[in-house]
Image (cartoon, rainbow, N blue to C red):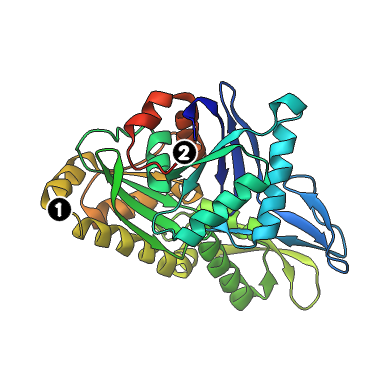
Amino acid sequence: MSILGLDLAVDLGAARTRIYVKRKGIVLDEPSAVVRDARTGKIVKYGAEGDPAGGHETCWPVSAGLPADGELTRRLVRHFLRKVHRRPFAARPHLVMALPEGATPIDRAALRDVAYDAEARGLLLVPHGLAAALGAGVQVRDGIGRMVIDIGRDVARVAVLSHGAVVASATVPVGGRAMNLAIARLVEREHGLLLDEAEAEEAKRQAGTDWKPLQRHVTVQGRDAETGRERVVSLPVQLIYEATRQPVEAIVRAAVGTVEGCPPELVADLGERGAVLVGGGALLRGLGRRLRAALCMPVRRAERPLYSVALGLGRCVEDHNLVNRLKSIIR
């Protein structure tokens, strides 16, 4: 494909889809959600068009950056692209998308199906870790080892980069949603309240990953499982910390294992340069401290962690010379 036509990047996330347009930046940021009529299966809404009404169900067709439901993902992306490209002559763009580390040829084909079903003229696939690093402002084209840890809705990814390529990586099937579900189970068990994911997410953000001091509490509002009434309870942060310990420790172990598998010279680089946190999970207070202690290296949060992948893909849209210099990009 000719890189002269690159003009659009799609960050296809499990929670949100973001679209970057050349010379305009991120122009769309909406939930990766499809709302269907529960009886007929007909699609009635996409993205941020509104909350589902009675008799409707919300589907999340993207998982770990790949189509879990190919048909719904294709319709979702096609809808978003048509929303961005409203003028007929601006249709059929070239697309840039992220390819998760460890993706199979079938996964690559699924992303190509999404692009071409959305009437794209061509597709460029950028390794996910590389896109996240570029968007976080990490220098990737020299030989110095650097690490990016991306904690998304349903997976966490660890990538070590050098010479413009991902040289070591790990993926664990836990992310922000696993932490939210753990908190929801805790509240139901201890207080008989049913929490929606948004409320669990807010409790997680308030609590962070460090429960000290012991007297800290957060409040949550849920629906009583017996009466159906709304009720507010106060939770010790220590309990939230314990509830989320397992998914957080899985991410820490993946990061440590990735470092241990790197060549000694890259490990030395990482000890000096450290790791960058991106994704929604990067906003979890205290997570950087826990990773810093386990990895024995600096850990910082990207300036715009939620948008790092989209911004990194956008750099490939804007800078054709950068695309030519990055050998790991798949055309």
Can residue 60 be seen in this snapshot?
no
Residue shown at 44%/64% (left/top)? 241
Q: Nearer the viewer, residue 112 or 215?
A: 112
According to the picture, the residue beneath numbered tag 1 turns out to be 263
Label ID, residue 177: none
203 horizontally vs 228: left or right:
left
Q: Quadrant of the C terminus?
A: top left
Tell me the CA gap for discs 2 and 1: 27 Å
285 horizontally vs 14: left or right:
left
Residue 317 spot, x, y in % from top left: 50, 29
Residue 116 spot, x, y in % from top left: 63, 45
Residue shown at 34%/43% (left/top)? 328
Q: Nearer the viewer, residue 230 or 313?
A: 313
Residue 103 in which image quadrant: bottom left
Asked if the residues shown at circle 2 and circle 1 are in contact, with their CB atoms under 8 angstroms apart, the answer is no
Residue 242 spot, x, y in % from top left: 44, 69
Q: Nearer the viewer, residue 103 or 230?
A: 103
Residue 106 to residue 268: above or below: below
Name the amino acid, label 2: Ser
Residue 132 spot, x, y in % from top left: 42, 42
Name the amino acid, label 1: Pro
- In this rendering, the label closer to the viewer, 2 or 1: 1
Say few, some or many: other residues with alpha carbon within 10 Å of mark 1 (under 14 / 14 to 19 / 20 or more): few
Can residue 28 be seen in this snapshot?
yes
The answer to which of marks 2 and 1 sits earlier in the sequence is 1
Disc 1 is placed on an element classified as: loop
209 horizontally vs 17: left or right:
left
Residue shown at 43%/25% (left/top)? 320
Residue at the top extreme, as displayed: 23
According to the picture, the residue beneath numbered tag 2 turns out to be 308
Disc 2 is placed on an element classified as: helix
Residue shown at 26%/58% (left/top)? 258
